[in-house]
Amino acid sequence: MMFYVTLLVFIFLFITNYCATRSLLHPSAITLLIWISLLLVYELFPHGLYPLSGMFYSALLLWVVPFCVFSCITSKLKIRNKCVLIKEIPSSYVKLNYYILLICLSVTIIGLFITVFTGFGTLLYDARQYMLQTFMHEGKMLLPSYLYMFERLSMIGFVYLLYLYMYEGGLSRRFCIIFVMLLIYFLLFASKTYFLQLGVGFLGLLYIRGFPVKRILFILISISLLIVLFEMTRNAQDASSDNVFSFLIIYFLSPMPAFDLLLSMNTDFTYYFEGEYVFSYFARLFSLVPNSDYLEYLGNSNYVYVPYPTNVFTVMEKYYLDYGMIGILVFSSIHGIVWGILYKYSKFNDCYKVIYISLLYILVFQFFADFSSNIGLVVSVVLYGCFLFLPLLLKIKKNALY
């Protein structure tokens, strides 16, 4: 019964939202499409996962409905702001950023090749295991000091790639060079998050440029399949058709019954202080919790069985762990307000547009986890996005003073 109620509410909100915005790139449209698709797949296709309880649907309604309402309201606010167009940026400044990123990527890739492939030959599995053993300490990636600064900028290099595509209006020699180097860097780090950021960002750009929705959906499905195959290869698993299907289930559906399992526990998960999960970035930054113990609230790296093993619990996990159902409601509203404002500004300001599409993966993969909790990465993307538009931002500020 709750499935049908939830589905009808989501479909009604989607139709209402689309009639008001005429955009599939609106935060609420993306959120509703993702959850409608997942609920239909979960209900209509055989998967072997545990059925979802009414408690899960109640929590999901508390997350989605306030998010959509507040993102729609804030995206309709009348905000006075200067129009910032990427084409007005001096070509010399674009070229300067190109060479800075090129140097950072070159140093990072060469350094990683030297470090990782000393005695290891398999790209995705052995290299990753070696990196984890060599660079990881108490949950943190420790790079050689000469690599760290260069790697930080390389990590958000996908923002420049999106920026360059918008500036040049398509593929160019500079674009292809940076794209290939980023792919090499992503493979060396064997991180699916980097691929998600780049892939989803480009799909957003293609939609803005009028690319057919059917082709975008096809590309999105293809990227999802590639990520699954990539993850299976990374973990040295057999990539047969049966295993691919099982992995698809684990990756895209299992977070929902896993979170449902958390709801049924009715347990106080607080170990150190209230808010330790939501504000995990600051808790680690100021050493308020031991890194080795942090977030091990279920033991065994938080793995649960649904019946497949998984340790991801959707975007709602941390808000529920700290503040229960009221936490889901409150932080859903906050997310909606922030995303609505960001979307509003992105309509007439190319700086915000680059930032918006660079962070779009957070919305698309909210069924998987709360990627926005990586505040360091989010802040880096925002600051780098502003830096890429620095000449225009300084010009606007200068004009405002006179």
Image: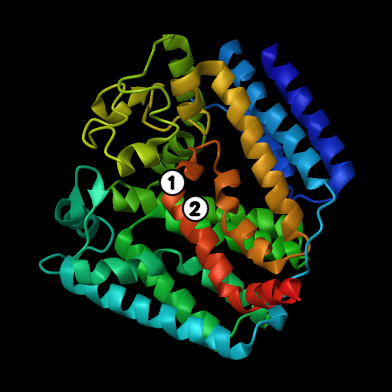
Q: In the rendered view, how is the structure colored?
A: rainbow
Query: Residue at position x 52%, y 34% from top?
Result: 315
Q: In screen coordinates, is 369 left or right of 286?
A: right
> What is the quadrant of the C terminus in the image?
bottom right
Q: In screen coordinates, is 328 left or right of 49?
A: right
> What is the quadrant of the N terminus in the image?
top right
C-alpha span from label 2 to label 1? 6 Å
Q: Which residue position holds label 1?
A: 374
Query: Residue at position x 21%, y 60% from top?
Result: 127
Residue 325 x, y percent position in the rendering: 56, 17
Query: Residue at position x 19%, y 56% from top?
Result: 135
Q: In screen coordinates, is 134 left or right of 319?
A: left
Compared with residue 121, is residue 277 higher up or lower down, i.e. above or below?
above
The quadrant in which residue 6 appears is top right
Query: Which residue is situated farthest in the right direction here?
Result: 19
Question: What number is the disc on residue 378?
Answer: 2
Q: Can residue 254 be spotted in the picture?
A: no
Find out whether the residues at labels 2 and 1 contact each other: C-beta distance under 8 Å. yes
Q: Residues within 10 Å of mark 2 (few under 14, many from 20)?
A: some
At label 1, the amino acid type is: Asn
97 and 173: which is toward the camera: 97
Q: Residues within 10 Å of mark 1 (few under 14, many from 20)?
A: few
The quadrant in which residue 311 appears is top left
Query: Residue at position x 48%, y 75% from top?
Result: 179
Count all numbered tags in the image, as a single digit.
2
